[in-house]
Image (cartoon, rainbow, N blue to C red):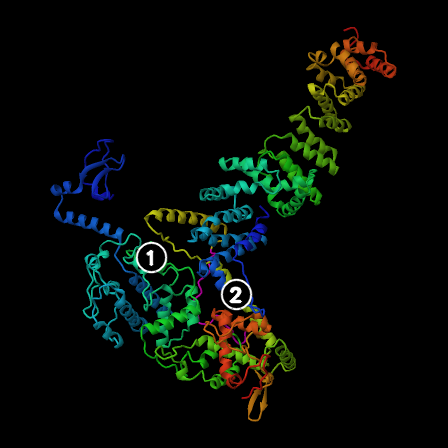
Amino acid sequence: MSDFSEELIESKTEDDQEESYVFSGTGMSFPWLQNHIGTIATGGKKEKDFAQTTSACLSFIQEALLKHQWQQAAEYMHSYLQILEDSDSHKRQAAPEIIWKLGSEILFYHPKSNMETFNTFADRMKNIGVMNYLKVRLGEPGGGFREGTDCMEHWLWCKNNEYCYRKYLLFVYLWGICCLWTDEDDYAYNAASQSMLNHSCKTSVNLGALIQTPGVWDPFVKSYVEMLEFYGDRDGAREVLTNYAYDEKFPSNPNAHVYLYNFLKREKAPREKLISVLKILYQIVPSHKLMLEFHSLLRKSEKEDHRKLGLEVLFGVLDFAGCTKNITAWKYLAKYLRQILMGNHLAWVQEEWNSRKNWWPDFHFSSFWAKNDWKEDKTLACEKALVAGILLGKGCRYFRFISKQDDEVLRKKIKRIKKSVENHSIVNPGL
Amino acid sequence: MDLEEAKEFKERCTQCAAVSWGLTDEGKYYCTSCHNVTERSKEVINTGAIPNTKIQAINRGLKRKRKLEKGWDWYVCEGFQQILYQQAEALKTLGVGPKLKDEVLHNFWKRYLQKSKQAYCKNPVYTRGRKATVLEDNPSHSDWDSEPDLLSDFSCPSFVESGPDSQLDSRTQKPFPISKASQSASICSGSLDGVKYSQQKEKGIVKMTVPRTLAFCYLSLLWQRETITLSDLLRFVEEGHIPYINAFQHFPEEMKLYGRDKGIFAIESWPAYEDIYKKMIEIAKFLDLPRFPDITEDCYLHPDILCMKYLMEVNLPDEMNDLTYQVVKMTGIGEVDFLTFDPIAKMAKTVKYDIQAVAVIVIVLKLLFLLDDNLEWTLSNIAEKYNEKNKEDKPWFDFRKWYQVMKKSVDEKKQKWEEARAKYVWKSEKPLYHSSIDRAVVYKRREMVVSLQKQFSALTDSAPTVEKKSPSSFQFNWTEGDSAGTCFHGHSLQGILKKKGQSLTTKNSLYWLSTQKFCRSYCKHVTTYEESNFSLSYQFIINLFSFLLRIKASSLHEEVSLIEKRLFKRKYSKTQKKSRSRKRRKY
């Protein structure tokens, strides 16, 4: 919507009657003759003052919009609306489009306006018959508007759906940012988005307000935050992300926390803060790949609670089928178990293991897995073997299988594993 | 649908068993809950239970209502008469004497009707006696006062029916010829003769239009030699002090306006000076008016006085009055015979008093400062130096300072004026429609516009409406002793005049003519105004004054040229030269 004003200024010169200067041979101009020529276009009648004042009004609106004087623009628009009753049918028919373009821009920016007024306005313009224009308008510039068009239509038909409405508006403004910040090869695209971006920067206050509306705005928030960071507004970015993540009105969105976490990490926030953010993520998505990072943070923490939680987190990650082959997770677990057991926190391990001992053996440590893992990834198998040994004792199938394996590279490792299991297994031998 | 009138009907409805009745237009009862219409109508019920007087009242009420919906029958010229009446009232509010409305304008109007109706009407029935009454002074009561009387001047039979109080004045009454069309109002216009009126193109007849109402007003003002010039009048119209645009909104409720009437009464342009001026002369000729009362030296419209007024208004020193006086004298434009309007004269012309006065001032400025983008600034430098050194004395007039002050004020005023114009609401509150078919469309459109407007006005701060300025003859006001010397009235021209024997002459001894060669062909203009041919100072002065009078710059330039022609008669009688002439000015 931001380039409507500029567009209109261009189109206005087309609309104006061409001021042709009539020159005689000596180069003199005859202003009065000019007027007569001008009237030929209007069928011999001089342009009425009504037409003159309405076009003056239009240019005042455009000027006010360019200068961001929303109040003035609204005042002029109030008067301009009489063009809908122009006796000149051409002007009358062209009016709704213009009014839609300018009116929606005013209503979008004016501080006193809100979604309700905008919807009412759109409703009325729809009645006047401005639908066709909308579809056309959304198709440019560039081709990436499909989503926007669909949303727009969706919006128009279910305008009470706040999600769609906000999405449409944000989309229109932020598509430029997305293009700019994602790797788009289309240079023409980028040129347009650059100007859009510039404009968007100026309207960032409004964007911020919009993102606060409950909803899922992941790509927009991401890009918006990137933009804010780029311009050095770290506080603003932090605020946006915090709101996005913690506001109760928003639907529970793991990504929100991910973004916040990444941002804080970039900012080199204190560990405590990072931990608190990830804690929530852990509650939402225990299997998230960031959990391993979370574990690292917890492991390094001085608080015992955190260290205990670190164990929980690891176990939590490995509860999920998708992570069974995650070697890092197994590595961590193996290492951590040793660490914890050396730290005399057998109780923690037992607590975690209690809820899992019924199903983990089959889930992770079956002979099928033993063979499979060894075939696919020996290192993984070793780590798992260690864990299995610690948790299940050296008698478990997995451990026995691996320990029997003879591999040149890993011989030493296996030896070490055997030793660790001997030392640390929580299972009493013979049980 | 008056529930009161249906109270007597106490039966239960056959369909819904409710007792709640209303009356349809035809006078039949209908149930207000299920809209079941009965065949029982009022008259049947009333005879038994209700006394006669009530029946009569009810009948009359029904009849009256019907009449109101249809409205009165009225002719287009009555509409114009209404407008003139409103305008005259407005002029009275502005301070014009009541004689204008009661006598002058009224007589002009009656004369017009006479002149036009004679050939206008197919059956010229009315009396010649009318003519005799016009030129006499009418000391007795005027007919404007009561509206029924007003309209009774042109009463038609249907009128007499509905208006029970029309006492026809014996002297001025004469019923209109009854044309068959009068019984049924024309479907294409609210007025009876709207269609015919707009189609009529009779030669020799000046057809009345809304702009011509202003011409009438001005003629009356001129006759009375009131202190309102034509440019003042038009400015008052634009500012809304005199009804013009949408004057029909104030017609009585019963005068319904639609269809062809729209083209006649709905105006979408402001009156232009040149246009109204031409129409004024045209009407004066058409009405065969005699020579107007003399414009003498003590008259407001005399150039001496107008020059004084305009000099004050544009903040120029009072001392310049001497010079304007001289110019007026030399050119002879202060002569009574020159100034007084005489339509019947062979070369009927009237003086554009305001433009001429302003043109004189322009000439004086040219005499003093040359306005060649050079001398005026040199003289300003001298004045500035003097003023710095002699702070206690009367300051010398500094053109540059004046220019700066005026430019700022004028630009501000112009900006406000343009903004107000852009915001101007042309459409009347009640929309006009062409026929019953598009009436619904028009009203719907209006509804939509109003609702949209509400949205946007909710966004603006409360009380955004431009305060209607109280009408004033002066657009600029400068007072002595105001902030930091912005008033130049008391400044002296000493710096730019020099002694020559007993009298003073200008230090500047050069001059250039605004137009060297006048056009002799039959085009309307005798000269053109191409801005780039002239100095910036001259352009500024011309633009300043043309904004003041709300006229085109070319009109003012033309007037300046014409007066210069008179001033330098000898120069023009010689063979023409192409180059800019330089002439020695003498007192």
The N terminus of chain B - image quarter: top left
**Where residue B580 sits: x, y (%)?**
59, 79
Looking at the image, is B45 positioned above or below residue B317?
A: above
Kindly give the residue lying farthest to the left in the view shown. B48
Q: Are marks 1 and 2 on the same chain?
A: yes
Q: Could you tell me how far apart the alpha carbons at marks 1 and 2 are, in whole angstroms?
A: 35 Å
Dominant SS of magenta comes to: loop
The amino acid at mark 2 is Lys
Residue B470 part of the magenta-drawn span: yes
Chain assignment, label 2? B
Residue, disc 1: B261
What's the magenta region? B463-482
Q: Residue at x 55, y 35 (%)?
A: A150
Residue B356 is one of the magenta-drawn residues: no
B499 lies left or right of B16: right
**Foreground pick, A350 / A329:** A329
Q: Which residue is mark 2?
A: B414
Residue A329: give x, y in percent of width and height. Answer: 75, 22
- Residue drawn 59% across the image and 47% down it: A2
Count of numbered tags: 2
Disc 1 residue type (three-letter): Asp
Indicate the quadrant where residue A176 lies.
top right
Q: Residues within 10 Å of mark 2 (few under 14, many from 20)?
A: some
Image coordinates of residue B236 in percent, x first then y, are: 42, 67
Outermost residue toward the front in this view? A25
Indicate which label's residue lies in the foreground, 1 or 2. 1
When the figure is inspected, residue B178 is found, relative to residue A192, above or below; the finding is below
Q: Identify the chain of the residue marked 1, using the numbered disc in the image.
A: B
Q: Nearer the viewer, residue B406 or A360?
A: B406
